[in-house]
Amino acid sequence: MGRLKYDHTAEAIGIEDETLAHLKVVVATKLRRQESFMMTWLPIGGGPNGRMSAWIHPAVPLVFMFDSAELPSINSKRLEDMMHATNATGELVLENLVRVEEE
């Protein structure tokens, strides 16, 4: 299980490596274009918080941490679906794919 660290003040978001690899491409593409967007997720297992959202912006530090040294292969259809959903609504929803890691 990898982690996404956003803004150095919030807790890391636990995301399995395959999803994190796809998320990295989507986020990098959007931020390279200077396009901010909302990212929303439900922590796995419910956690202390219900639905969580973060405004993803090019000026905010972002670190992708993978458990494995080898990156999973990228599924072009999954990537296309994620980009389409994000572009259509301005929000990337990762339902049940991530959880907040305790630090």
Image (spheres, rainbow, N blue to C red):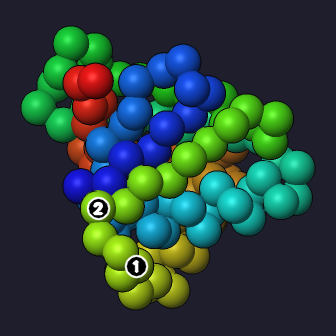
Q: Which image quadrant is residue 65 in?
A: bottom left
- In percent of width and height, residue 87 lies at 70, 56
Residue type for callout 2 = Asp
Q: Identify which residue is drawn at 40% across, 24% down.
A: 11
In the picture, the quarter occupied by the N terminus is bottom left
* Residue 21 pos. (x, y %): 45, 68
* Residue 7 vertical position relative to residue 50 in the rendered view, above or below: below
Q: Quadrant of residue 41?
A: top left
Q: Local crowd at mark 2 within 10 Å, few (<14), some, or many (≥20)?
A: few
Amino acid of disc 1 = Leu
Taking the image as shown, residue 33 lies to the left or right of residue 48, namely right
Whether residue 86 can be seen here: yes
Would you name the residue on which mark 1 appears?
71
Q: Which mark is residue 67?
A: 2
Q: Which mark is residue 42?
A: none
Q: Is residue 91 visible?
A: no
Find numbered disc 2 in the image and state the secondary structure of the residue it sits on. loop
x then y, percent, for residue 47:
18, 21
